[in-house]
Amino acid sequence: MQNFAPGKRILEGIRVLERWQIIRLKLGDLQLDVLPGIGGRLWNIEIKGNSLLFQNPDLTGLSFELKDLQALPTQSPQYGFPLWGGEKTWIAPDTLWPNGAPFADLDSGAYQVISQDKFHLEMISPVCSVSQLSVSRKITLNSANSWTIEHKVRNHGNSNRKTGIWSVMMLNSPARIAVHMDHPSSLRVFGSDKGLVALKRNCVVIDCSKRQEFKLGLRNPDGHTFIKLSRNGPWLKCSVPPPKHDNQYAHELPFEVFNSGDYDYCETEWHSPVKNLDPGKELNFKQSFQIFTDHTEIETRSHHKELISCMS
């Protein structure tokens, strides 16, 4: 596991947290580190000593002010916001972001811990001063190889607002990402994916093995995504509700993949259907994750052998 900056410590109880204090959920060989102080992030997933999520080495441990986020160091100056790492809740569509940056109160602000025990942690953001939205995140460790993330967004404003929940997970590279489709296709959002996307008979496989910036949108018709980390695993499966025929998405499609050209990470990005969220109303989105430590385990325990075979 990554060494944290001096002065950080892991907390066992609910209390006022400093920016870089970590709360840890652990069961067997699976460990989830959560960072409430910076956007309520799932900061790391660790299985048998393998760290799966990217934490930006340029930013880890730095002090900062929300009004001065653009002054933080970065190797990706084309993005006008800090790339902290981990997994977080963003608000879609990004066309409504101020100056092209996610809402700072929600992405970089400190979340309050409202419920906690050995196997779950629930946090809530402040009300965003720009969007008038708040975000709640509940992470529950269900077993030694599974957990859920429940996202909730509430509109505290006086008018309705086009809103989608957008879970963005920054994974260490290399990684391979696959989605099952009867008629494989992808939508290039930007960048060059040349040589890194394979449209196979019944799936799309994306190879995030080198620094080459691109972003793709995918249909994800059954709601399942498979990710293979490094050459030999582990494997990660995410399941979300399958799209319905009348669902609309803020970015057109329910699943996106981004690959960085500046750091060794890629992003898997899951979207809820978009809604015009009325004042006082909430939008919910739940993800279920399973982790498998090797190919034999995933072949034995998964019901998606056809999809797994197309990644080999």
Image (tube, rainbow, N blue to C red):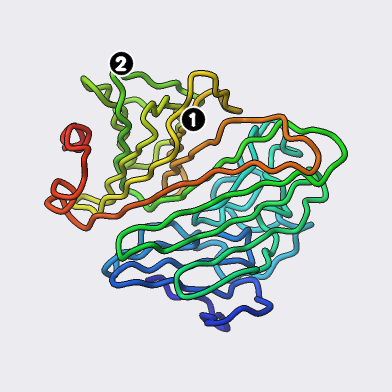
The residue located at (31%, 47%) in the rendering is 174
Instruction: Using the rendered view, name the quadrant where residue 198 is placed.
Output: top left
* Element assignment for label 2: loop
Q: Is disc 1 surrounded by few (<14), some (14 to 19) or many (20+) residues within 10 Å?
A: many
Position of 23 with respect to 94 (left or right) is left
Q: Report which residue position mark 1 lands on.
A: 254
Instruction: Using the rendered view, name the quadrant where residue 193 is placed.
Output: top left
Whether residue 205 is situated above or below residue 129 in the rendered picture: above
Q: Residue furthest top?
A: 183
- Position in image of residue 254 (x %, y %): 49, 30
Position of 57 with respect to 47 (left or right) is right
- Position in image of residue 25 (x %, y %): 44, 71
Closer-to-camera residue (142/229): 142
Whether residue 106 is situated above or below residue 308 in the rendered picture: below
The residue located at (44%, 56%) in the rendering is 54
Quarter of the image that includes the C terminus: top left
Closer-to-camera residue (260/248): 248
- Position in image of residue 204 (x %, y %): 30, 27
Whether residue 9 is situated above or below residue 263 in the rendered picture: below
- Position in image of residue 186 (x %, y %): 39, 21
Q: Report which residue position mark 2 lands on.
A: 183
Closer-to-camera residue (133/242): 242
Q: Residue furthest right?
A: 158
Of label 2 and label 1, which has the lower sequence position? 2
* Amino acid type, residue under disc 2 in the picture: His
Instruction: Using the rendered view, name the quadrant where residue 130 is placed.
Output: top right
Position of 307 with respect to 99 (left or right) is left
The residue located at (61%, 28%) in the rendering is 250
